[in-house]
Image: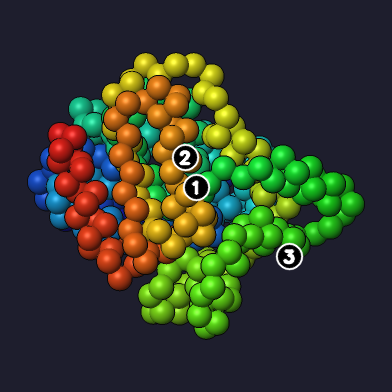
Amino acid sequence: MKIIKNSSFRSDFGDVYYDEYIPDCTNGVVIAIAHGMIEHKDRYEWLCTSLAKKGYNVFINDHRGHGESIGGNIVWGEMGENGFEKAVDDMLTFHNLIMQKFPFHRFVLLGHSMGSLLSRRFLQLYEDKLDALILTGTPSPNKMLGFGVVLFRILEKMGVKGSPKISDLFSFKSQFKRKVPQKDRFKTHWACSDEEIIKLRYKDPKCQFRFTLNSFANLFEGMKKVFSTYPHSPQKRHLPVLFLSGQEDICGEYGKGVEKSYHHIKSQGYEDVTLKLYANARHEVFNEPNKLEVLDDMLVWLHKQGF
């Protein structure tokens, strides 16, 4: 296996950085990974390595305002004006770059959390670029999205700097719907039950910033589009789509929200949609104690789909 770290391509703000994991013997499939909010590509190294060992060409980039992809007015937590849509534009540029390198390979997009929202927006706009879509830890539809956009824009105009704690009410409001051990209530423990993963995240400065008001507003505007009726009927009705989520994931309303997302994509005309929920697993299914089970299930699904 060959691993190439921190290559880059140009975007409107500067450089977007990415890693490549090239197997010794390729199976003719590329998997591009879109990471979640307030994290970065290096957290997925074990997953990328595991997939490359199975013959997949794996690519992952840092989204704008994350990891190494910063520059100018784009800093950690600030994705810029219309940042959600521009992050999707970056994904299209990334796709085109990858397919220039591997023109006869099939393209699978794997998005986690915020990355799953970006991936679902990519599906809406660039369905023809996809051969399969995998969504993990995908957030659920939220009736407060419209209010959140208005609130964040008002606070911006008032000159409020940074992301106030009220943003946490939108991000983690369902955290208190279930009783969890007191030691698990604070900060990011909702994301993963592996204490070592949490400790590493706390020590990682690339995971310890906050989203700006502008970035939250852009994210919520993007979510409204993702959960809306698609602008056109699908041309690839049989495009394989896989949802993988933890039953204890607060972002997915403990499974209920993921089921809503599953039914939403089916309602847009996609016929080959699969949902798998994991008991006792939280948000980061590829970091949970049963991560090998999740990986194996994904590989079985890919093989059944001919990838």
Question: With respect to residue 273, does 44 lie above or below?
Answer: below
Question: With respect to residue 177, does 98 lie above or below?
Answer: above
Which residue is disc 1 drawn over?
Answer: 257
Instruction: Label 1: state its secondary structure.
Output: helix
Q: Disc 3 to disc 2, how far (Cα)?
A: 27 Å
Which residue is disc 3 drawn over?
Answer: 165
Which residue is disc 2 drawn over?
Answer: 261
Instruction: Label 2: state its secondary structure.
Output: helix
For residue 8, say whether it is visible: no
Evaluate if marks 1 and 2 touch, with contact meaning CB atoms under 8 Å apart. Answer: yes
Q: Residue at x 69, y 46 (%)?
A: 144
Quadrant of res 236: top left
Q: Earlier in the sequence, mark 3 or mark 2?
A: 3
Q: Please state if 222 lies on the left or on the right of 41 as rendered.
A: right
* Residue sticking out furthest to the left: 25
**Which amino acid, mark 2?**
Ser
Q: Residue at x 52, y 83 (%)?
A: 183
Numbered mark located on residue 125 in the image = none
Q: Nearer the viewer, residue 140 or 126?
A: 140
Q: Nearer the viewer, residue 193 or 110?
A: 193
Evaluate if marks 3 and 1 touch, with contact meaning CB atoms under 8 Å apart. Answer: no
Q: Residue at x 66, y 55 (%)?
A: 170
Quadrant of res 160: bottom right
Q: Please state if 213 lies on the left or on the right of 28 as rendered.
A: right
